[in-house]
Image (cartoon, coloured by chain):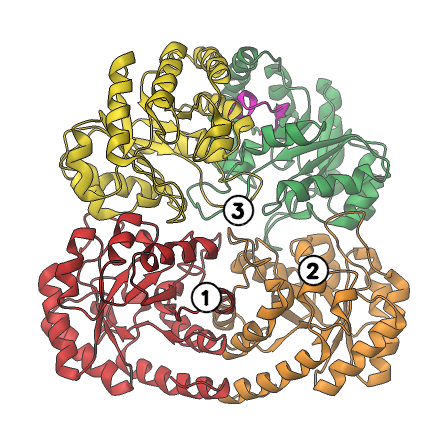
Chain colours: A orange, B green, C yellow, D red
């Protein structure tokens, strides 16, 4: 899965879609409703962004995933997206999780910044117990004392969750590290540790991004990552 | 502010209301909609609990505060409660916060388990920037490596927030420590550090509580706390 | 206990000694051997500093406490100091602790930045089991994700340790918060929570300090703290 | 590098040495002086263990590495070991580090449980600035709120340290995770992320180990790991 942090314009998301398709990714991501720490930061293009994402995905033939923040937006977003994402700040928003249990779309559930692994599975259980069994877990970094990285991407979660659950587990090294130069090594490490996939932020021009520029890969680096991922996957007897 | 973790029956909340009123508290708390880690744990009495809380508050002459989890429950809950609480797990649920900015009721905003203090103020800003200026901040413990306490109640937040904002700051030592024997010393410490109030879980019979029994004070201990609080408050030239 | 972070000159430690004595403290602290993160920072006046501390203490009639870092310096330092301090970075330096078990001087054992409370008691046990029963525990802040304070002073440790051990417990709000404006409120909170004492960094001219200037109180503020401490201590039926 | 947590007998260390040599490791590890949380736990075979380690290494033709805890043991240990290890609890024991700067042996410096990466490099600088330039850094897990693993092995440290320093970086997934089933996936991830090597605890019979049994690999699993490591290393254009 790959794509920009936020959908910013028709041109930006279309260009990103072409890049991620060409490099061999199998899902397009893009944020329309953005949870931002400050109410004065760019909050996403909202419904307009969603339509742009849907169109970009169709144009290149990739399913799309985007974040849902409000329980009452679920239906509207589900009409346009193939997969719904729950962000780290809503990892224990039980009203939202409960309603996602009634949706007929796969859910990408991100681990919260201070969610223990047993609590993470319990959050998934809010969705599963509602009848929606298509849940994909996503490790995206936890809060620790270390400030050299934005978060501490916790790859230990992969083999542990593999022992504890049958749910697929992917890793988001872009948010997990917050630093572009760490994205490739940590994505490779995630696959070596047994992850079922990675979610990568790719932006045609990261230096112009409206959010999280420093962690987004430019297109050439993303293509390089995809080639390296295939080699590591093969070394651990898997395919990407 | 004081009262049981969860409203469990008419008798329980009425008895609790009498106890907290008699000891001199000025607000009654009680959970009707309970965010629980597991979907299989007791989730609160929901709307029925809310009505019981309202009645118990009226009977003893205390305003009531209760938690709201879903943006679309706000209006309904606001009809029956005098103050709306945002729980730690929803500390960065921006859909919820944004709608609370449009409500004409004071909001009790709890710090998230991994919310930095600058992010805490930004979360408050989501409410304030919507036009609702009646926000009370509540420190309730953060996630650290220490497992001897349920959370690490971070009293450093009090003087720091006092430097940074004019918003009132209260402390919840019940959730913050998770241990009944720590509630009284940490409540006294909170007042000594400059907190504007404390929120205490009191239950007529903690050993029969449906949630968080080990951290709820029994009535006699609560009365003892109130007496001790008045003395410490006086020593720092404040009143309770 | 009070005094400067590091001994810097005869004049500085003498002036500090007079200030802390006048305000009513009962022990003088001062670092001669300083553990600094960088090998290029000021490392303390070492043996010369120790002699200045001893003299300053004698002049005002206060016992002195200073840090020991190397097991083989213990004897030499014990000849000139009344109490030996183990710093946070050496909280689990078992070679050092074991040798301190054979010394006939009280030991001030600081909690490490990531030491759990049960491990803290086990560290004390290294000294106690050697035959030296005069150990004083010191909470001085732990490492957490919060960066608004230098460390997170964990006052929860006080009532918990009071439940678990008969050893005296003091609190160091200067290192624990790293911020001068937090020292007074957190010192008061420590006493309200049941601490047996506080250790405060006082410097005649903090803006000229060679280490940790921003957290050291100037003399007038220290005197103000001592007066406030007496009032809070009285409110919880103790004396300072 | 591989070998048992602690040297327990001549037979145990010899058998371990044969196993690690046969599987292709290039250094033998074994603890003679063991830093244990409790003074009542097994503290290692000390000098006798050191001689057994030296002999086992010679017999199979592998250099040996062992921990030094006390500055005054350095010379004695350096006579028998090819590399000296500084454990996590002594990561900021500056007396020890300073003296290791004067030794003509390579040093394996473990990151402390709460050491930030910039502090880790400053700790190395204590050795380097003394004139000993042969320092190898070792990531071995940090303290976080997550309790499902003994520590949180922080692989993000690898690419970051690679950006910041020319010093070699290895990873210890045995202590870093504390769980045997996580050792292989995390060792593979470490190599994929760019680590220069791994340090693995191997014990002929982990269930009989005197310390850290649950995290030590048995011989057949270690051989399996070595084969998998070679494949992943090749996929990232390196050799083991």
Q: CA distance from mark 2 to mark 1?
A: 35 Å
Task: Tell which subunit mark 3 falls on.
Answer: B
Residue D221 horizontal/vertical position (percent): 32, 81
Q: Is residue D217 above or below residue B71?
A: below
Q: CA distance from mark 2 to mark 3?
A: 19 Å
Residue B111 horizontal/vertical position (percent): 64, 40
Rate crowding at label 1 as few (under 14), some (14 to 19) or many (20 or more) other CA atoms within 10 Å. few
Residue D174 horizontal/vertical position (percent): 35, 68
Residue B204 can be seen in this image: no
Q: Is residue A208 above or below residue D196?
A: above
**Depth order, front residue of D106/C239:** D106
Residue A102 horizontal/vertical position (percent): 75, 65
**Depth order, front residue of A107/D73:** D73
- A45 left or right of C171? right
Residue, disc 1: D165
Q: Magenta stretch: residue A59 in it? A: no
């Amino acid at each position: 899965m790959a794509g920009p942090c936020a959908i910013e314009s028709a041109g930006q998301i279309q260009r990103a879609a072409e890049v991620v398709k060409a490099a061999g990714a199998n899902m397009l991501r893009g944020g329309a409703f953005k949870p931002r720490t400050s109410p004065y930061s760019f909050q996403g293009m909202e419904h307009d962004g969603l339509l742009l994402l849907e169109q970009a995905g169709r144009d290149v033939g990739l399913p799309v995933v985007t974040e849902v923040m409000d329980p009452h937006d679920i239906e509207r977003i589900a009409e346009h997206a193939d997969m719904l994402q729950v962000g780290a700040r809503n990892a224990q928003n039980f009203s939202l999780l409960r309603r996602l249990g009634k949706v007929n779309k796969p859910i990408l559930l991100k681990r919260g910044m201070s969610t223990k692994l047993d609590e993470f599975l319990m959050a998934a259980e809010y969705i599963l117990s509602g009848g929606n069994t298509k849940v994909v877990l996503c490790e995206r970094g936890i809060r620790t004392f270390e400030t050299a990285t934005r978060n501490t991407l916790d790859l230990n979660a992969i083999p542990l969750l593999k022992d504890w659950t049958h749910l697929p587990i992917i890793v988001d090294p872009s948010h997990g590290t917050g630093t572009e130069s760490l994205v490739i090594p940590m994505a490779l490490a995630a696959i070596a540790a047994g992850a079922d996939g990675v979610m990568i932020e790719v932006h045609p021009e990261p230096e112009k991004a409206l959010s999280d520029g420093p962690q987004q890969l430019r297109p050439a680096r993303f293509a390089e990552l995809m080639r390296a991922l295939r080699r590591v996957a093969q070394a651990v007897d898997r395919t990407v």
